[in-house]
Amino acid sequence: MEQHLKDFIGADFVRYVVEALGVQRIKHGIRPIKDPAVLELLCAISADDPICFGNDIEDEYFFLANQLGFTTAELDRVASNGFDVALVDDGRKREILREVVDVVGGI
């Protein structure tokens, strides 16, 4: 299940839709950054609206690593979580993950 949240929706509501409603994908939910416990529930990133915001997924990972100090292991977890909730069938997910491991496995 997916929920499109406006930027002004608080972290408490994000917790509610994840825990009570079983939502796995949050769009535009930026307020969880205010509550580390809620942030722990949300462990994937995306580059939403790159045309509007001028970002791509590489920019998001760069920010996590260089501005927030994420380790390689943490970035790996974020990427894996993203594949867990990706809207593709499980066979395709495994195929993509193998490709990722082949590319970044030595990092």
Image (spheres, rainbow, N blue to C red):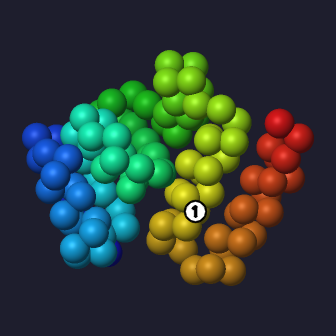
Residue at image position (35%, 62%) is 25
Image position of 10 (left or right of 45): left
Q: Is residue 62 visible?
A: no
Estimate the x, y position of residue 28 in percent, counting from the top left. Answer: 25, 46
Which residue position holds label 1? 83
Q: Is residue 78 left or right of residue 3?
A: right
With 95 as the anchor, is 23 left or right in this view? Answer: left
| Quadrant showing the N terminus | bottom left
Q: Residue, x 52% and y 39% (percent of image)?
A: 57
Q: Quadrant of residue 71?
A: top right
| Horizontal and vertical percent position of residue 91 | 68, 80
- The residue that appears at 89% across and 41% down in the rendered structure is 106
Residue at the front extreme? 37
Residue closest to the far top: 67
Of the residues shown, which amino acid type is indicated by label 1?
Phe
**Residue 72 at x, y percent in the picture:** 70, 36
Which residue is found at the position 58% from the left and 80% from the top? 89
Quadrant in which residue 18 is drawn:
bottom left
Vertical comparison of 37 with 87: above or below:
above
| Residue 16 coordinates in the image, percent (x, y) | 19, 64
Q: Let me know if residue 103 appears in the view.
A: yes
Horizontal relation, residue 70 to residue 12: left or right: right
Instruction: Assign the C terminus to one quadrant of the image.
Output: top right
Which one is in front, 43 or 49? 43
